[in-house]
Amino acid sequence: MLLIDSHLDLAMNAVAWNRNLRLDVQTIRDGEGGMNGKGRGRGTVALPEMRRAELAVCVATVISRTARPGSPASGVAHQEISYAIAQGHLAYYRVLEESGVVRLIGDAPTLNDHLQDWKKRGAQAPLGFIIGMEGADPIVEPRQVEKWWRDGLRVVSLSHYGISAYAHGTGTRGGLTPAGTELLATMENTGLILDLTHLADEAFWQALERFSGPVLASHNNCRALVPGERQYSDDQIRALASRGGVMGVALDAWMLYPGWEIGSTSPQVVSLEAVAAQLDHICQVTGDSRHAAIGSDLDGGYGTEQTPHDLDTIADLQTVPGLLQARGYTEADCAGIMHGNWHRFFREAWGG
C-alpha cells in the first residue's frame, strides 16, 4: 500500500550526522558501530528502505534552531546561521533531484503525476519530496518568505523546541511574537502551508485564529492517550479537523507510551499497536478517518532505542494497515490513512 509520510529529517541525518542515505540501513548502522550518542548505530531510515516501505512521498525537512535568551533549547548564535544551515539541507535535496533519485514536489499537478508514476512503476520511480521547515528560524525576516517559496519551500512550522523568533514552542508557555503574526500574513499571501506541530498551546490557538490558509500537524500524537503538552488535546484535534487539516502520528516512543523516560525505558514496553491506537483516537474524535495519517519522525534525533520494539526500519510501517483492519477499519480507510488523506490535503491546499 502506498505511503505518504509527513515528517522525515533526511537532510539533518545526511548533513549533520554524516549519513550516506543511499546506503541501506544496516550498512549505515555498521558504519556507526562503536559511536557514542543517541541513535548512533540504530537508524531506521535510508533511501532503499523508503522504497521498501512504498513511501512514494514524504515531507522532507530543513531545520536549524537559533538560540534565544530565555529559551530552554539550544541553537546557533544567529538566524543568519540558521538560514545557511537550512540552505545546505535544501542543497542536499537538490543534488538528489539532479541525480534522478528524488523528485521535488511543489504543486498539485506534479503531485498527481508523481503518484500515478508510483502506481505504474512502484519503487522504480523517484522518491517524492515536499520541502518543509521545522521551526521558522531559518526565515531571517518575514519578507524572505517569497525567496524561500522560489527555493521550493512549501510547509513551515513556526517553532521547534524552545522559543523561536516567531512563537513559543515545545517546553515553553506563550503565544506568537509580533514577528510571528507578520510571518503568518506573509505565508498566507505566498501560499505556504502552516504546520502547527511543536507550538505551545497558546501559540497554537493564536496561529489558528490569525492564519486563514491551509493547516496541518505533521507529527503529533494524542494527549488523551499520552499526557503532555507536546501532544494535542481532543479540542485541538477537532479544531485542526474543522479547518480541513490532517494529523500525522509520530513514532517517537515517549509520545506513544505514558511515562516513558528517555534513556531508560525499554522499547519492549511499546509496539506498533500504539501507533494504531493513536490513529484510531484521531478518527474517533473527528468522527471519520479523513484526518489521520502518518508523520513518523523516524530518525528525528533518535533510533530503535526509542521506537516501538517491532519496528526495525521504516519499511515496517507497512504493518499498520493490518493493525487497523483488526480494529474494524476498511481497506479504503487504511488507504486514506496511509496516503490518501495527505494526497487530498496537498491537492486541495495547492488548488488542484
Image (spheres, helix red, strand yellow):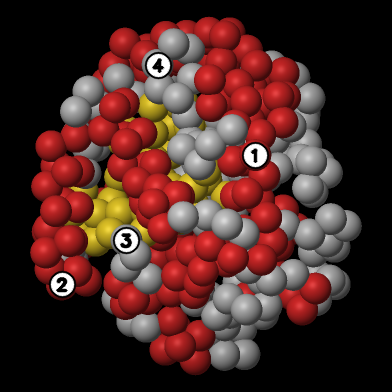
Left or right for 266, reference 326: right
Q: Residue at x 67, y 77 (%)?
A: 309
Answer few, some or many: residues within 10 Å of disc 3's Cα (few below 14, many 20 plus, some between 14 and 19). Answer: some
Query: Contact (CB < 8 A) between labels 3 and 4?
Result: no
Q: Amino acid at mark 1?
A: Gln
Quarter of the view holding residue 144: top left
Give the mark count: 4
> Which one is nearer the viewer's eye here, 17 or 237?
237
Residue under numbered circle 3: 2
Q: CA distance from mark 4 to mark 2?
A: 35 Å
User: Circle 4 — which element?
Assistant: loop
Q: CA distance from mark 3 to mark 1?
A: 24 Å
Q: Residue at x 56, y 25 (%)?
A: 240
> Which one is nearer the viewer's eye here, 331 or 319?
331
Q: Residue at x 37, y 83 (%)?
A: 24
Left or right for 111, reference 342: left
**In the rendered structure, which disc, 2 or 1, sits on the residue that comes first in sequence?**
2
Answer few, some or many: residues within 10 Å of disc 4's Cα (few below 14, many 20 plus, some between 14 and 19). Answer: some
Answer few, some or many: residues within 10 Å of disc 1's Cα (few below 14, many 20 plus, some between 14 and 19). Answer: few
Residue 147: in sight, yes or no? no
Q: Quadrant of the C terminus?
A: top left
Q: CA distance from mark 4 to mark 1?
A: 25 Å
Q: Amino acid at mark 2?
A: Gln
**In the rendered structure, which disc, 3 or 4, sits on the residue that comes first in sequence?**
3
Of the two numbered discs 4 and 1 in the rendering, the one whose residue sits closer to the viewer? 1
Residue under numbered circle 4: 213
Answer few, some or many: residues within 10 Å of disc 2's Cα (few below 14, many 20 plus, some between 14 and 19). Answer: few
Residue under numbered circle 2: 124
Left or right for 42, reference 156: right
**In the rendered structure, which disc, 4 or 1, sits on the residue that comes first in sequence?**
4
Residue under numbered circle 1: 284
Left or right for 341, reference 170: left
